[in-house]
């Protein structure tokens, strides 16, 4: 009898509390969104949009079982669908009067589901660590289950139905559109660039232009390259391996004996300045404009641009000064 709880807990961690299970649940939600889109007559391209979310749902649901080449073909099919302008959203919107009424009724309690996500995420990371498992993976799993917790709490707070929740989820999902999958695609692009030796190519170009003893220009090239690659990829974490292996390590860290941790974090956050300036960082710059129904879809970027350039300039000066002092 005493063995049963331990066996059940081990089963949960091996079968349920896994990324594969989170992907499965995500896929099922996308399949529900697809079915709702197919019957939404307010969407002029409901067939193309429905197929897009259907295929994406299949990738999430069966991705661990499908061969990689098939997943790649399905991703290319998604890109083709969106490129052909077949992915759009319906005209269904919640009345502003109803939104204001719900906001007054719920008050600050509306933040409870939002706060539940980081709390559950942190709890999972901690539990995974205490059990000797990968805490980073635990945080990702916790993020998925945090979303489930937020859904349940939201239903209890609002008194809504599961169908209402899915309809509103679909509306927000369609407001963001195909850019939902952009972070995954850009992260893959970073891996491809690194494997293709793009960083080495950049380093050879810099070495031909900038003298090896000019520290300031090397730091400038390092931070500029990081920002530009982040603007192209939309993600500083995807750009960092390219710049670090091609520029930061061989041209700055090794020749000048620089502390790698210090140089790496400043270079990384210099790239984050580029995140503020690019539509490729859709989840930061384009999605908010869509959700807030802003007239200018690039309004967020235009507002952030002077701040981003200022922050980036300080990164260049800070890295140069720290190398000189330390």
Image (spheres, rainbow, N blue to C red):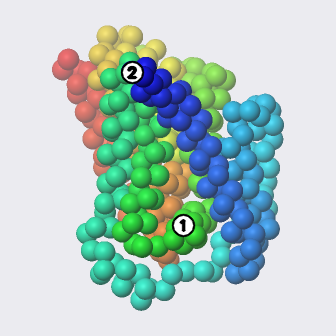
Tell me, yes or no, if residue 244 can be seen here: no
Task: Work out whether 240 lies above or below 42.
Answer: above
- From the viewer's side, name the closer residue of 22 and 323: 22
Query: Which residue reaches farthest left?
Result: 325
Tally of marks? 2
Q: Residue at x 66, y 44 (%)?
A: 60
| Image location of residue 187, percent across then percent down | 57, 37
Q: Residue at x 58, y 20 (%)?
A: 200
> In terms of sequence position, does the residue under pointer 2 or pointer 1 come before the other?
2
Q: Quadrant of residue 170?
A: bottom right
Tell me the SS state at disc 2.
loop
Mark pair 2, 1: CA separation: 38 Å
- From the viewer's side, name the closer residue of 281 and 23: 23
| Tag nearer the camera, 2 or 1 | 2
Task: Work out whether 239 lies above or below 247.
Answer: below
Circle 1 Cα neighbour tier, 10 Å, few/some/many (<14 / 14–19 / ≥20): few
| Image location of residue 81, percent across then percent down | 78, 58
Give the left or right position of residue 15, taking residue 39 as reference. Answer: left
Residue contact at pointers 2 and 1, CB within 8 angstroms: no
Task: Work out whether 22 lies above or below 83.
Answer: above
Q: Residue at x 70, y 62 (%)?
A: 34
Tell me, yes or no, if residue 63 can be seen here: yes
Q: Residue at x 29, y 16 (%)?
A: 259
Residue behind mark 2: 2
Question: What's the mark number on residue 211?
Answer: none
Give the left or right position of residue 293, taking residue 92 as reference. Answer: left
Residue behind mark 1: 162
Tell me the SS state at disc 1.
helix
């Amino acid at each position: 009898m005493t063995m049963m709880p331990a066996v059940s807990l081990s089963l949960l961690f091996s079968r349920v509390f896994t990324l594969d299970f989170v992907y499965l649940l995500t896929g099922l939600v996308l399949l529900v969104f697809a079915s709702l889109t197919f019957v939404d007559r307010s969407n002029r391209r409901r067939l193309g949009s429905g197929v897009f979310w259907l295929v994406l749902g299949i990738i999430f649901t069966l991705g661990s079982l499908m061969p990689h080449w098939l997943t790649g073909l399905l991703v290319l099919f998604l890109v083709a669908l969106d490129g052909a302008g077949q992915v759009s959203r319906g005209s269904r919107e919640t009345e502003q009067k109803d939104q204001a009424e719900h906001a007054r009724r719920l008050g600050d309690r509306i933040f409870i589901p939002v706060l539940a996500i980081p709390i559950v995420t942190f709890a999972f990371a901690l539990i995974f660590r205490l059990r000797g498992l990968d805490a980073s993976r635990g945080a990702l799993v916790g993020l998925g289950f945090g979303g489930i917790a937020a859904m349940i709490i939201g239903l209890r707070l609002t008194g809504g139905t599961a169908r209402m929740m899915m309809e509103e989820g679909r509306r927000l999902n369609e407001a963001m559109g195909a850019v939902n999958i952009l972070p995954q695609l850009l992260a893959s692009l970073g891996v491809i660039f690194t494997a293709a030796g793009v960083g080495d190519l950049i380093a050879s170009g810099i070495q031909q232009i900038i003298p090896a003893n000019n520290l300031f220009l090397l730091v400038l090239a390092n931070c500029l390259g990081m920002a530009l690659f982040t603007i192209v990829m939309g993600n500083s974490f995807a750009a960092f391996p390219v710049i670090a292996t091609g520029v930061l390590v061989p041209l700055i860290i090794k020749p000048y004996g620089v502390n790698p941790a210090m140089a790496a974090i400043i270079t990384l956050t210099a790239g984050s300045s580029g995140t503020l300036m690019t539509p490729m960082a859709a989840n930061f710059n384009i999605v908010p404009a869509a959700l807030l129904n802003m007239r200018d879809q690039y309004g967020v970027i235009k507002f952030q641009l002077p701040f981003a350039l200022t922050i980036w300039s300080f990164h260049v000066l800070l890295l140069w000064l720290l190398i000189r002092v330390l």
